[in-house]
Image (tube, grey):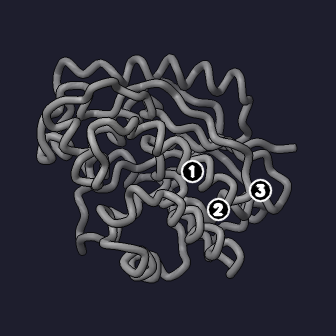
């Protein structure tokens, strides 16, 4: 049984950006492992980190990341994949990023999380032994996405990688920020046209992240509107050699 390992920065990124592919591969008999990097709970959050919780309508007493991890489990069920893996690293607001603009600026010079992630990736790959990796292109420029890409590209990985385009940043602006565009510009582009079942599973998985839907989309109707703008297509850049026909991909 082939294995695909999706490296999701946050608890929703993989489902949002390549949930259709994950559901399709599971249906084809692949073992699908969705591993999220930044899921560590932080007791008694303060400042901007607390504000990021309060603006979702959640009180300070709620274990925000525990709530989100539970949503991730529900999303995996909707996709038809195994329960997800949750790594213990802290999101950027808990690593000294103190405002929304900082989240979408260059990583802080003292933020060494990329080196920590590099070690974690080596362990995950050794343990899961994937035949294919999925990872973000950091479209939108969120620092956690950028650091994940830096970690994964810091050494040669002898496994094909499909780099997804980060939804919903892809549809928020006509020309979203792409701080790592030069890294991906030379790579071939592939796309997957989702069949109705894959689209339905992806939509259900996205909706499972209930704490994020209002903030990200203004509600479920907004989610549906943004998904419709993707036209049922997921797009990727590719590193390494893969059999695109087996995956159901077409050259863009």
In this figure, which residue is indicated by the disc labeled 3?
Answer: 26
User: What's the distance in space between the residues labelled 1 and 2, CA to CA?
Assistant: 11 Å
Kindly identify the residue that appears in the image at 69 percent across and 55 percent down.
77
- The kind of secondary structure element at disc 1 is strand
Say above or below: 189 vs 184: below
- The kind of secondary structure element at disc 2 is helix
Q: Where residue 105 sits in the image (x, y, percent)? A: 16, 42
Kindly identify the residue that appears in the image at 22 percent across and 37 percent down.
50
Q: Where residue 106 sits in the image (x, y, percent)? A: 17, 37
In this figure, which residue is indicated by the disc labeled 1?
Answer: 162
Marks 3 and 1, the one that precedes in the sequence: 3
| Mark 3 in CB contact with mark 2 (< 8 angstroms) | no
Say above or below: 20 vs 122: below
- Position of residue 111 in the picture relative to residue 74 (left or right): left
Kindly identify the residue that appears in the image at 46 percent across and 82 percent down.
228
Q: Where residue 201 sits in the image (x, y, percent)? A: 65, 69
Q: Residues within 10 Å of mark 1 (few under 14, many from 20)?
A: many
């Amino acid at each position: 049984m082939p294995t695909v390992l999706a490296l999701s920065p946050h608890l929703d990124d993989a489902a949002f950006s390549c949930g259709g592919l994950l559901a399709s591969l599971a249906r084809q008999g692949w073992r699908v492992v969705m591993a999220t990097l930044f899921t560590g709970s932080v007791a008694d959050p303060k400042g901007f980190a607390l504000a990021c919780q309060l603006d979702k309508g959640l009180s300070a007493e709620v274990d925000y990341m525990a709530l989100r991890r539970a949503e991730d489990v529900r999303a995996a069920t909707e996709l038809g994949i195994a329960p997800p893996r949750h790594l213990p690293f802290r999101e950027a607001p808990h690593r000294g990023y103190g405002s929304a603009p900082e989240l979408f600026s260059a990583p802080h010079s003292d933020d060494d999380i990329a080196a920590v992630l590099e070690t974690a990736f080596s362990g995950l790959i050794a343990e899961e032994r994937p035949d294919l990796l999925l990872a973000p292109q950091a479209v939108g420029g969120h620092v956690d996405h950028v650091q994940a890409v830096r970690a994964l590209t810091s050494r040669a990985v002898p496994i094909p990688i499909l780099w997804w385009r980060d939804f919903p940043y892809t549809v928020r602006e006509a020309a979203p920020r792409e701080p790592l565009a030069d890294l991906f510009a030379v790579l071939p582009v592939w796309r997957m046209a989702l069949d109705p079942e894959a689209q339905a599973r992806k939509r259900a998985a996205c909706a499972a992240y209930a704490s994020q839907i209002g903030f990200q989309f203004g509600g479920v109707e907004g989610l549906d509107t943004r998904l419709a703008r993707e036209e049922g297509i997921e797009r990727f850049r590719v590193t390494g050699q893969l059999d695109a026909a087996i995956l159901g991909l077409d050259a863009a």
